[in-house]
Amino acid sequence: MPRNAPWPAVTHERLTWLIEQGGDSRRSVGRHRYDSAIVPSIATHDMLLPSECALVSEDVRTAIAAFDVRVGDTLAPLESLLRKIESSASSRIENVAAPVPDLLIAEVGGEQARSVTEVLGNVRATDVAIDLSSDITPDAVLGIHRALLSDTHPVLAGRWRTEPVWIGSYSAGPPAAEYVPPAAGRIPDAMDDLCDFIGRTDMPVFVQAMVMHAQFETIHPFADGNGRVGRALIHALLRRDGLTKAATLPISAGIVSQKHRYIEALTEYRHGDFVPIVELGADAMFAALQNASHLYDDVLRMRREWEERTSELRSDAVAHRVVDLLLEHPVVDSALLESIVGASEPTIVRALGELHERRVVTPIEHDGTGSQRYVCQEIVRALNAFTTRSINPFGRH
């Protein structure tokens, strides 16, 4: 039952699991009937904000502001890595695992396992969500979904689902499911309403982002990729309203260790209580901030050590410019660096050799074209440490 956060609960309509959908209406009707959700409109619904939600939202805003003051521009080159960390964690919630180092290797032409391809799609979806954050419309949501699935499920990419989906039953269909989202015909109106809700300015943005996410997951507008698109939309709202600025804080890395609680919070939301999803989102954000602070400390330490190891090189040496790029591109080859640095291939190769001698980068495999790849193992270790910390239980800090 809702606590002291009145919010419209999901209602239901009784539908039949049809043979063309995998069921059989010619058999026992009782075994092939199911309750499909009718998602309430929230675009103009009054929000009575409980004091705990107001306080936690302000705590989140204060913590992020303090993080920005401490970090400044230091983590700006890590923004692309933070988005990969977030996308990897978001995919892991959906049981798709691809370590961040594998994503880095794939970006310079390495072979891609299917899981890597899926997570790179999630990276693109997050990029698109943030790029479109100033005007989140149904078409924008479709664009985010298209970026997510275009390489792995092109037939589904960028399209609302046309058939039932269900949660909690993988073989028996919706009659045995724990929750059946609304019928496909209800999706366009539900998404129009959600986007109108996103445009509201009468509530704290963090509360709005988490309620938006829960409503999106309740609608479940896609045949696949709902969770990943929904979490990308959280970042879009936080960036649009300036709650997060340069960095994409990996909130999914905080959620992944509390997947059971996450599912429970979404269930409570469907019953008319948005407090649990806001509290879980806050705890995940606090965990992400603490984890990113550790990463910031690691970056400061690495930079000091790299400066010491390369101090005797000429000030205009190309190796210094390569070092400056490592935070954004921990895996590099001569072709990538030529396009970014603008130096000749022999100069790049010599710079990489100098950095290898000084234990800044380490050569890895050839890519079959004669181009040697190098990896900054210290960054990889820092990313692996981040992942390890993210799967531990968290609380408010």
Image (cartoon, rainbow, N blue to C red):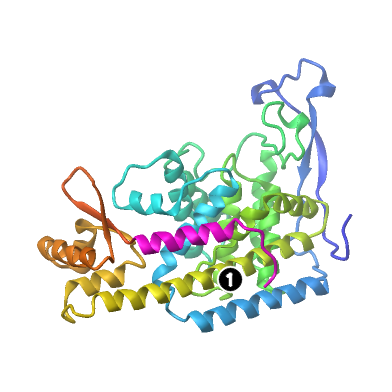
Give coordinates of residue 293: x percent, y percent: 53, 73
Magenta stretch prevailing secondary structure: helix
Label 1 crowd bin: few (<14), some (14–19), many (20+), radius 10 Å: some
Residue 192: x %, y % from top left: 65, 55
Q: Residue at x 47, y 48 (%)?
A: 119
Residue furthest bottom as drawn? 69
Please give left or right for residue 239 compared with residue 76 in the image: right
* Tally of numbered tags: 1
Is residue 170 positioned above or below 288 on the image?
A: above
Residue 140: x percent and y percent?
A: 52, 56
Q: Nearer the viewer, residue 93 or 361?
A: 361
**Residue 390 as seen in the image, left or right of residue 204:** left
Q: Secondary structure at mark 1?
A: helix
- Residue, x 36% and y 68% (percent of image)? 327
Please say whether residue 98 is one of the residues in the magenta stretch: no
Residue assigned mark 1? 290
Quadrant in which the N terminus appears: bottom right
Residue at the spot 39% in from the left edge and 49% down from the top edge = 102
Residue 77, picture quadrant = bottom left
Does residue 203 appear in this view?
no
Q: Would residue 21 be found to the left or right of residue 88 on screen?
A: right
Q: Amino acid at mark 1?
A: Gln
Inspect this view and state whether residue 311 appears.
yes
Q: Residue at x 28, y 70 (%)?
A: 323
Residue 341: x %, y % from top left: 21, 68
Bounds of the magenta segment:
377-397
Quadrant containing the C terminus in the rendered view: bottom right
Asked which quadrant contains residue 174, the reply is: top right
